[in-house]
Amino acid sequence: MLTSSDQIRNLVARYVRNVDLRDHQAQIALFSTDAAIRMLSSSNGEEELRYGPLIGGAAFADASAALRQAMPANRVDRHCTTDHLISIEGDIATLDAQFLVVRTEALDTGGCSTDIVETGHYRWAFRRDAHGWLACTLDIVLDSPVGQSASKPKVSTDVQHGSGSLA
């Protein structure tokens, strides 16, 4: 029987595999219906909100699908997580993990190139119900900003674990 920590680590592993496989329906099942998901960028300890919050796994899966559809067929991304820091208090848990995205792309010359294209960390909150653990918040914090640089509001990193809301 898996411990709660193992169940939570497995949920994160299913999340990154579903992202890589573009299995957006499987993504939805990992989140509570009121989950809040944000994407932020971090530079020198300062965080900027880039996207979100998106509310619910379905909204997040739709946004993820739109981003991933633009990827060419000759490219494969693999999200890897490490250094999982887990805290559990009753039916509420948090996990902070570092991630990197490894991209392999077929070249016209017949070979392929492999690069690390993104790094950052995930801040998760989970709650357990009669069916098991579900993600109720996810902050995806990128070490390198996504998209165009723009003036964005500063974001509090306080999360109300278990309510699906962000401060």
Image (tube, grey):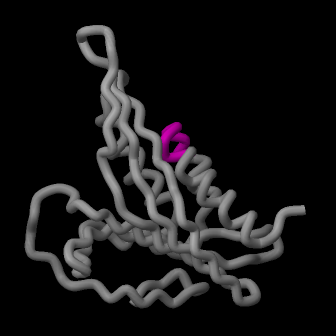
Q: Residue at x 54, y 66 (%)?
A: 83
Q: How many marks?
A: 0
Left or right of 85 on screen, residue 71: left
Image coordinates of residue 4 in percent, x first then y, are 77, 72
Vertical side of 153 occupied by 56: above or below: above
Q: Residue at x 57, y 56 (%)?
A: 28
Check the image and name the residue furthest to the front.
Answer: 83
Q: Residue at x 77, y 69 (%)?
A: 132
Left or right of 120 on screen, residue 16: right
Check the image and name the residue furthest to the top.
Answer: 110
Image coordinates of residue 88 in percent, x first then y, are 69, 83
As for residue 52 lying within the magenta part, the answer is no
Q: What quarter of the picture does the N terminus occupy?
A: bottom right
Vertical side of 57 occupied by 17: above or below: above
Q: Main secondary structure of the magenta part?
A: helix
Image coordinates of residue 10 in percent, x first then y, are 68, 57
Corner quadrant of residue 6 = bottom right
First to last magenta residue range: 18-24
Vertical side of 160 occupied by 145: above or below: above
Q: What quarter of the picture does the C terminus occupy?
A: bottom left
The residue closer to the viewer here, 142 or 50, is 142
The residue closer to the viewer here, 137 or 33, is 137
Left or right of 115 on screen, residue 139: right
Image coordinates of residue 161 in percent, x first then y, are 56, 86
Q: Residue at x 31, y 9 (%)?
A: 110
